[in-house]
Image (cartoon, helix red, strand yellow):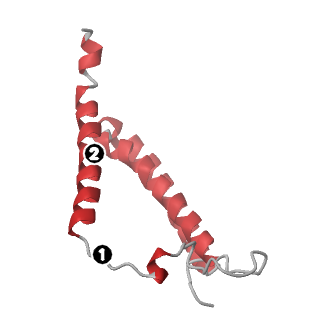
Amino acid sequence: MNSNLYDFIPILIQVAFSFLFVFATVLASNMLGPRRKNARKDANFECGLDPIGNARSPFPIKYFLVAILFVLFDIEIIFMYPWAVNFKELSWEGFGKMGIFIGVIVVGFFYEMKRKALEWEK
């Protein structure tokens, strides 16, 4: 076996443990959780809106806006992980670049606050 393939063993172990953890928690919650079924709980649920009525009626876009902003900030956090892992090798140059990156994120966050994008009720 090639020595390069041995480098992937920790990643494969992590993926296996991740799948095992997800399977175990779903199984445990299914076995240990309460079972109270009724018509309201069995009904379809979509974005906080009742699935009954005219499909062309206006609805608040606020839920979708908050969801998109969450995904945006979540992806930005993902970009910080490789930087944190390689922090020592990147030295002050990497620190400065991440400072600029975080600065752009903070400016965007204050812009959203100014536009009142995160307020649920207006």
Q: According to the image, label 1 marks what residue?
A: 35
Q: Nearer the viewer, residue 90 or 10?
A: 10
Q: Is residue 31 above or below residue 81?
A: below
Residue type of the residue flagged with mark 2 = Ser
Residue type of the residue flagged with mark 1 = Arg
Distance from label 2 to label 1 (Cα)? 27 Å
User: Residue 17's spot in the image, x, y percent?
Assistant: 23, 42
Secondary element type, mark 1: loop
Q: Residue furthest top?
A: 1
Q: According to the image, label 2 marks what residue?
A: 18
| Marks 2 and 1, the one that precedes in the sequence | 2
Which residue shows up at 43% across the image and 55% down it?
77
Secondary element type, mark 2: helix
Q: Is residue 13 above or below residue 95?
A: above
Q: Quadrant of the N terminus?
A: top left
Which residue shows up at 24% across the image and 26% down it?
9
Is there any visible trace of residue 107 in the rendered image? no
User: Residue 24's spot in the image, x, y percent?
Assistant: 23, 53
Horizontal side, residue 41 vs residue 109: left or right: left
Q: Nearer the viewer, residue 74 or 59?
A: 59
Horizontal side, residue 88 vs residue 54: left or right: left
Residue 62 falls in image quadrant: bottom right
Which residue shows up at 25% across the image and 57% down it?
27
User: Residue 121's spot in the image, x, y percent?
Assistant: 59, 89
Horizontal side, residue 51 vs residue 86: left or right: right
Q: Quadrant of the C terminus?
A: bottom right
